[in-house]
Amino acid sequence: MTTYDDRASLTDLTAVVERVRNSVEGVIEGKPEVVRLSLTVLLAEGHLLIEDVPGVGKTMLAKALARSIDCSVRRIQFTPDLLPSDITGVSIWDQQRRDFEFKPGAIFAQVVIGDEINRASPKTQSALLESMEERQVTIDGKTYELPSPFMVVATQNPVEMEGTYPLPEAQRDRFMARVSVGYPSAEAELQMLDVHGGVSPLEDLQPVAHAHEIVKLVEAVRGVHVAEPVRRYAVELVSATRTHPDLRLGASPRATLHLLRAAKASAALSGREYALPDDVQALAVAVLAHRLLPTAQAQLNRRTAEQVVQEILQRTPVPAAAPQQSGFGLGRGGPGYGPQPPRRL
């Protein structure tokens, strides 16, 4: 088995991530938890959906994350007249060569910023499905690989805003996590006036990490150990969404995989080579809620998907640390786990 030392040490990971975190937080004031979730999704090889009302810094967060890494970046402004070929690319007839030549679209970048993704039609939104899941694009029967690392950071205004289209369920399911930036505190907003009042801090933002460093860190995160009770805990959480009376659509097996990958990345960001139930709990709402569809009765009762996930977290028993002889020892300095009652959040 490949170990952390074979690929990248925890010291290397935390040092690089700390540089990126400080760079992004220099632009997005007062939102450390949002920045951490963004870095977690990046290291877990996922895609991030930033959903909030206009003017709270959704695009600013996406740009700050992209510019902090020395890699190729493309921005797509989603509009009602945007075509799928504008995203994936198109084959054009070359008169001199008398053959079709493929012109890559905006998706061929390591970090793709999809601004206001729900302003495009569902057909155009669906052009991202293959690239987000398989990291490739198929045009006219030919498959083109996308660069590595590859991450889509999409922003979205709430569905009730005029001129928007709800994302198809298949599209939402491909985003590892959804985050809301929210309004800043009074202190953070006052600091924002000082920092952003003159020149935008994005103009002076320089890359603090290279793409090849991110690739090594992603490989290191893959090596984080997850004990069998923690894996079972994640499966129980996701399974509970499929039978909950307030939901007409639960989370998919892809959601379980995304939750596990995000927990491993969160553990690595905390300097651990093993994931804990706390990692799963902390990410459950961000990873699961946007995939769930409440029933009509739940909507009438103003029950949100986030509230349902919180309820499931409170009802599901949490495995707790136990001595190594319990049979769940990791063999790498991590704890074992035994059954425990649900934990009050």
Image (cartoon, rainbow, N blue to C red):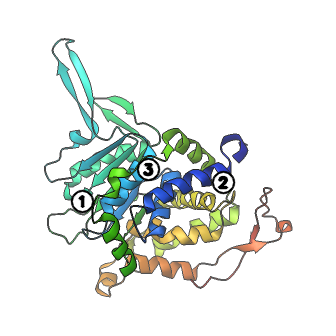
From the top left corner, tell me how far across and down residue 184 is, in percent. 36, 75
Q: Which mark is residue 249?
A: none
Mark 1 or mark 3: whose residue is earlier in sequence: 3
Residue 150 can be seen, yes or no: yes
Camera-side residue: 330 or 243? 330
In front here: 39 or 32? 32
- The label number, if any, that marks residue 68 in the structure image: 3
For the point 33% across and 59% down, the residue is: 60
| Relative depth, front residue between 74 and 148 | 74
Q: Mark 2 is on which residue type? A: Val
Label 2 sits on a secondary structure element that is: loop
Judge whether 191 appears above or below 148 on screen: below
Decide if residue 216 is on the left or right side of residue 118.
right
Q: Around disc 3, counting alpha carbons within 10 Å, would you say few (fewer than 14), some (14 to 19), or many (20 or more)?
A: many
Q: Residue at x 22, y 39 (%)?
A: 85
Residue 215 is situated, as x and y percent measured from the top left of the image, at 54, 42
Q: Residue at x 39, y 79 (%)?
A: 187
Q: Please tell me how crowded label 1 is: few (under 14), some (14-19), or many (20+) other residues with Cα within 10 Å.
A: many
Observer-side mark, 2 or 3, equals 3
Q: Amino acid at mark 1?
A: Asn
Q: Which residue is mark 1?
A: 118
Tell me if label 1 and label 3 are in contact, CB under 8 Å.
no
The dot on residue 224 is: 2
- Label 2 to label 3, Cα distance in Å? 25 Å
